[in-house]
Amino acid sequence: MLYRIYRGRLTFKLYVIIVLIIIVTVCGYLFPQFRFNPIAPVTVQPSTLHSRTSRHLSKLVTVVFRQFEDFDNDVADSVQSFVSAYPNMPVVVVCDNTPYPPFPFSATNETLRNVKVVSLELRLEASPRELNPLTYILTEYVLFVPDSVRVSRRVLQQAVAANTGITSNIVAIGIANSHLICQQLKWNYVDWTLQYNKDASGKLCDAVHGQHALLMKTSLLHTLPQPFGLPFPESLYLQTAVKNVKVQILDGKLGAGRSMLKSPGAKQRVSRRMRDNRVALYKQLGVKALIREDGRVQWFGCKRETQRCFPSVQGTPSYILSGRNTPPCCRRNMRRAAGHVLHALLQAGTRCWLETTSLLGAVVSGDILPWAEYVEIGIHASDVSRVSWLQRGGADADGFVWERATKGHYYRVAFSATNRVYVLLLPFTARNGTMWPADWVLAHQREFPERHLHPLAQIQFAGRQAPAPNDARAFLDLKLGNGAVERCNRIGSKLLFP
């Protein structure tokens, strides 16, 4: 038979060869366990290995989009980038309100079966679970990505590998050519102050500035009070920094999508919304002063045109009950008021001096006490008539409001008609070598020998030289008890507000 095939026509030979090839191919497909070269090592094809890794990451990571603009975004194409690379990976798009215009994709599309759009808008018919994005994050890791991003399989694998074995750290992944800046963050709750510093080493950061994605463990997300707060990720970094969670910057980068927000109007709109979100966040947290990397201070507290940061005091100020000092903006406004009042009094030729609480702050730190409610200045009662504003009252040319107390013979100078942080002017009357309060009563005030005012001394206070009793420590011991200066820092506000 083989001889006939060998002697046959060429066409017949070709038919036989084709049939043999088909038989071998079908057998190889139906019985893959058989190999023609069993001695060679078995290797997995790159495509098969990639497929297995993709399925593995799909079970590990949930992608979350949080910061984007309704009127101009690339969310649809960014979502499609992840869906194409990882068809089974969960994707959650978190919105403040129902997006309009809606995203150009349908949730009923089978290829987008794992994509969920979650609105934080209050809906009376919804349950708490439906309004909580954490309900839809069931994987071990969560990847927060900004708008207009394209996934890189290799970089995502690197990020997961970098986070494997780390208990609480976060991995930051840059986008395209974005320059990431490592920042150290200090949140001083007691002094209402938030401070950022640039970290040149860039190894372990409290926060990262620049367009980037964040990979973190979902278990960490559950420990944060508001993990999806705006502006994002600034709000997230404030919460993780308090828990001493560090951020590592990955060497690899994800791809960038299409360019957006090209018009100046769109950029201004986004900048304004970011500023509003930041002001709302700082108001919620009680951030009154923001110290930037270059040392500039940005104020978010009270101004001359706004009310002060704490309500009317009934016994102990509200901020002390909260475990805080006087808001720094209020202390700044008190310094301005104190400087203005001292200048007016000295210009009128009055005999005045720093009184108890203010003198204590001047001796301890050369400034207002961290927990002071007001500035106290003593004045000879016989010199009150020299100051015209103490006689007529009202707002002066600089907007400071002079007024006399309705009960008691003392005066108050407010920072403005709206902002009521103030300076107390306390008249003392000299009788038989003793200075007596002139018909007013404060819990920590009492009479003192007149010799403390002859002569008056000068002391540094709130950025200027101010008149003071000639023996400040003895004066304070008389008013507040022995060792008042030494006890000041140890006892703190309890010294004045027991």
Image: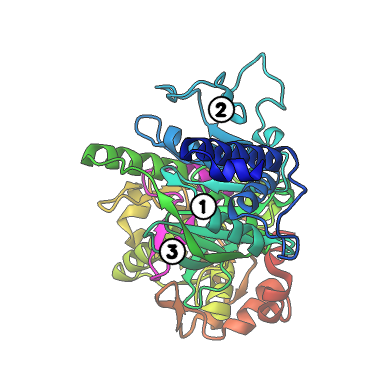
Amino acid on which disc 3 is placed: Leu
Q: Quick one: label 3, few (<14), some, or many (20+) residues within 10 Å?
A: some
- Of callouts 3 and 2, which one flags the residue occurring earlier in the amino acid sequence? 2
Residue shown at 30%/55% (left/top)?
Answer: 388
Q: Quick one: label 1, few (<14), some, or many (20+) residues within 10 Å?
A: some
Residue 119 on the magenta span: no
Residue 174 at x, y = what percent? Answer: 46, 58
Amino acid on which disc 1 is placed: Glu
Mark 1 against mark 3, which lies toward the viewer?
A: 3
User: Is residue 160 or residue 394 the one in the foreground?
Assistant: 160
Mark 3–mark 2 Cα distance, whole angstroms, equals 34 Å
Q: Secondary structure at mark 3?
A: loop
Residue shown at 68%/60% (left/top)?
Answer: 43
In the picture of the structure, the residue carrying the numbered disc 2 is 111
159 left or right of 336? Answer: right
Mark 2–mark 1 Cα distance, whole angstroms, equals 33 Å
- Of callouts 1 and 3, which one flags the residue occurring earlier in the amino acid sequence? 3
User: Is residue 174 or residue 395 the one in the foreground?
Assistant: 174
Q: Secondary structure at mark 1?
A: helix
In the picture of the structure, the residue carrying the numbered disc 1 is 234
